[in-house]
Image (tube, helix red, strand yellow):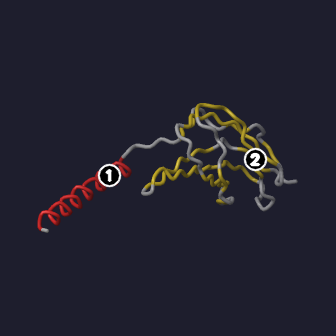
């Protein structure tokens, strides 16, 4: 009976050490789920509220994980949009992304800060932040 308890104790100790190494790896590994290779350029410098603003993105995505994107309009005010899932394909690509300009935004000069949130493992979430160049919302 003592031999069985001794083997169980060693099994628990080895398992705990293994879990500590796994948790350390998950917390310290330098994940880079996506990297933007060029600045985000808007296709139209002046836009009306209620229209769609399009901008070009070039990126290299190294994983198949889906991100949640939060877009923030930044001026003297900060206006958050609802979080939405991304549909960016893995690999290096260039594409045009479109975002709705809310009617509630007052005229002024803005830029969009996009936060891509990746859940890379059970212990860690990575946020990748990228910003567009400035554009102007004009009065309708």
Q: In the rendering, which numbered label is found on residue 112?
A: none
- Specify which label sits upstream in the sequence, 1 or 2: 1
Name the residue located 52 percent from the left edge and 51 percent from the top edge: 127
Q: Position of residue 27 (x, y in %)?
A: 37, 52
The reply to whether residue 74 is in sight is no
Q: Would you say 25 lies left or right of 95 here?
A: left
Q: Would you say 140 lies left or right of 27 here?
A: right
Q: How many marks?
A: 2
Closest to the camera, between mark 1 and mark 2, is 1
Front-most of 114 and 64? 64
Q: Residue furthest bottom?
A: 1
Distance in Å between CA atoms under marks 1 and 2: 46 Å
At mark 2, the secondary structure is strand
Question: Residue under circle 2?
Answer: 136
At mark 1, the secondary structure is helix
Q: Residue furthest right?
A: 140
Q: Position of residue 55 (x, y in %)?
A: 72, 39
Q: In this rendering, is residue 62 above or below 12?
A: above
Q: Position of residue 93 (x, y in %)?
A: 64, 31
Q: Are marks 1 and 2 in contact (CB under 8 Å)?
A: no
Question: Residue under circle 1?
Answer: 24
Q: Would you say 34 lies left or right of 48 here?
A: left
Q: How many other residues sit within 10 Å of disc 2, few (<14), some (14-19) or many (≥20)? A: some
Front-most of 33 and 35? 33
Name the residue located 64 percent from the left edge and 41 percent from the top edge: 88
Name the residue located 18 percent from the left edge and 63 percent from the top edge: 9
Q: On the rendered image, what quadrant is the N terminus found in? A: bottom left
Q: Position of residue 103 (x, y in %)?
A: 81, 59
Q: How many other residues sit within 10 Å of disc 1, few (<14), some (14-19) or many (≥20)? A: few
């Amino acid at each position: 009976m003592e031999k069985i308890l001794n083997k169980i104790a060693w099994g628990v100790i080895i398992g705990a050490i293994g879990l500590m190494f796994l948790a350390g790896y998950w917390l310290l590994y330098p994940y880079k789920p996506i990297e933007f290779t060029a600045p985000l350029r808007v296709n139209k410098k002046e836009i009306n509220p209620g229209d769609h603003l399009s901008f070009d993105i070039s990126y290299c995505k190294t994983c198949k994980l889906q991100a949640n994107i939060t877009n923030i309009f930044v001026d003297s005010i900060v206006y958050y949009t609802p979080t939405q899932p991304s549909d960016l394909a893995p690999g290096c690509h260039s594409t045009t992304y479109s975002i709705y300009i809310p009617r509630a935004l007052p005229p002024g000069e803005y830029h969009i800060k996009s936060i891509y949130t990746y859940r890379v493992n059970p212990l860690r979430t990575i946020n990748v932040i990228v910003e567009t160049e400035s554009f102007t919302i004009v009065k309708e």
